[in-house]
Amino acid sequence: MTVSATATATTPRRYTRTAMLLHWVLGLALIGLFGVGIYMADLPFSPQRLKLYNWHKWAGVTILVLSALRLVWRATHRPPALPGSVENAMPGWQKWAHHGTHHLLYALFFAVPLVGWAYSSAAGFPIVFLGLWQLPDFVPASKELAEAIKPWHQYTAFALAGFAVLHIAAALKHHFVDRDGLLARMLPGPR
């Protein structure tokens, strides 16, 4: 067996089912959480707004945990390499954008909920996950610190949304324009 045949035999052609599940659950959760965040930001003070803020925090903690699981899974399970035909057809800037977007998405999966947690802590509103477990404050309560952190949760959330849209657009371009089968590697179905 040659070196290239060995590499092909050990390199998966598709993502694992666990990777697919984490990808799609995290993606849908992020879309839903972003929508709720946009909606609740302009609500007047009310029990409904407080309920949505608590739900938003719980979902953010859940996304943080899912992101950690996804990162551990990715570190311990080799993702499929880009097919040679796809990689050879991509200009250098697209390869750079492909890898850069993935790295930024992973960084933002952690940054957005951690900045939100820091803001909630600084504002003096602890996170009581599912109304049962109070999480430790991420930073000490401070009105000045809360005001400094608050816009960064929004900035990082919009950055995550922007890179997610870029990621989705690239996947759809590969699927509908290039028709190169790249998206199928992340879709459930026969192996």
Image (tube, rainbow, N blue to C red):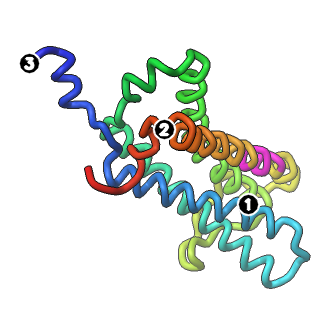
Outermost residue on the right side: it is: 44
Tell me the element at label 2. Answer: loop
Task: For label 3, count other residues whose C-alpha is less than 10 Å away and answer few (under 14), some (14-19) or many (20+).
Answer: few
The label shown at residue 179 is 2
Q: Looking at the image, do the residues carrying marks 1 and 3 touch, with CB atoms under 8 Å apart? A: no
Residue type highlighted by circle 3: Met
Outermost residue on the bottom side: it is: 47
Task: For label 2, count other residues whose C-alpha is less than 10 Å away and answer few (under 14), some (14-19) or many (20+).
Answer: few
**Image depth: mark 1 or mark 3 in front:** 3
The residue sitting at 83% across, 48% down in the picture is: 151
| Residue 8 coordinates in the image, percent (x, y) | 22, 26
Predominant secondary structure in magenta? Answer: helix
Mark closer to the chain start, 2 or 1: 1
Q: Which residue is mark 1?
A: 120
> How far apart are the two marked residues, 1 and 3, measured between alpha carbons?
57 Å
The label shown at residue 21 is none
**Image depth: mark 2 or mark 3 in front:** 2
- Residue 107 seen in render: no
> How far apart are the two marked residues, 2 and 3, measured between alpha carbons?
31 Å
Side of 183 relative to 101 (left or right): left
The residue sitting at 45% across, 22% down in the picture is: 87
The label shown at residue 1 is 3
